[in-house]
Amino acid sequence: MRLTSRTDYALRAALELAAARGTPLTTSEIGGAQAIPASYLGAVLAELRRGGIVKARRGPEGGWTLAREATAISLADVIRAVDGTLANVAGTRPEKLKYKGAAEGLRSALVAVRAAEREVLESISLAGAISGKFSAKVRLLLKNPSAWR
């Protein structure tokens, strides 16, 4: 799995907002807490707003908050809001790929990778990521020493 800087920033900003528990945060506050340039973060937050992850309120009491409870927003939701599909090959979804000859099995392998990625990312909410409370399946993956290499 490869995350762009934009996606990394989106995940970190969403987690910062989840940790704020409904208290509005400014772009500068989020950027300062996560060392994200405020100018770039503004564009990322706008994408998250279009994706239904965050909402903005103007004024002296304004700022950014999550659009839903942190338990109802998965890491996959945040990634999809800024990147679209979770896994693709040069912009094509794995099930739409066509390979020939020795590479025919690659399509199935890539679909399986996407399914595994989806299973993990959809099972971890923003609240779960903050608290470290993961499903039994994710905890089992994390116990394997090779996961950390």
Image: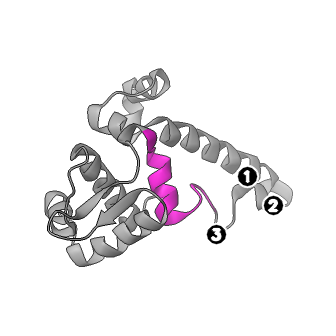
Image spot of residue 124 (x, y percent)? 43, 37
Q: Point out residue 148 in the picture as x, y percentages from the top left corner.
A: 35, 37
Between circles 1 and 3, the one closer to the viewer is: 3
Query: Does residue 76 lie above or below 59 as drawn?
Result: above
* SS at badge 2: loop
Which residue is most to the right? 101
Q: Amino acid at mark 1?
A: Leu
Q: CA distance from mark 2 to mark 1?
A: 7 Å
Asked whether 71 falls inside the magenta stretch, the response is no
Pointers 2 and 1 in contact (CB under 8 A)? yes
- Along the polypeptide, which appears first: circle 2 or circle 1? 2
Q: Secondary structure at mark 3?
A: loop
Height in image: 126 above or below 96?
above
> Measuring 27% from the left and 52% from the top, which residue is drawn there?
17
Q: Which residue is mark 3?
A: 91
Quadrant housing residue 135:
top left
Residue type at mark 3 is Gly
Upstream in sequence: badge 2 or badge 3: 3
Q: Mark 2 = which residue? A: 99
**Region in magenta:** 72-88
Q: Secondary structure at mark 1?
A: helix
Residue 106's mark?
A: 1
Assess disc 2: are there few (<14), some (14-19) or many (≥20) residues with their C-alpha within 10 Å of its C-alpha. Answer: few
Is residue 90 toward the left or the right of residue 12 in the image? right
- Dot 1 or dot 3, earlier in sequence: 3
**Callout in the foreground (2, 3):** 3
Q: Is residue 73 magenta?
A: yes
The residues bearing labels 1 and 3 have C-alpha atoms spaced at a distance of: 16 Å
Where is the C terminus found, in terms of image quarters?
Answer: top left
Residue located at (42% from left, 56% from top)? 53
Say whether residue 35 is left or right of residue 142: left
Characterize the local packing of mark 1: few (<14), some (14-19) or many (20 or more) Cα atoms within 10 angstroms: some
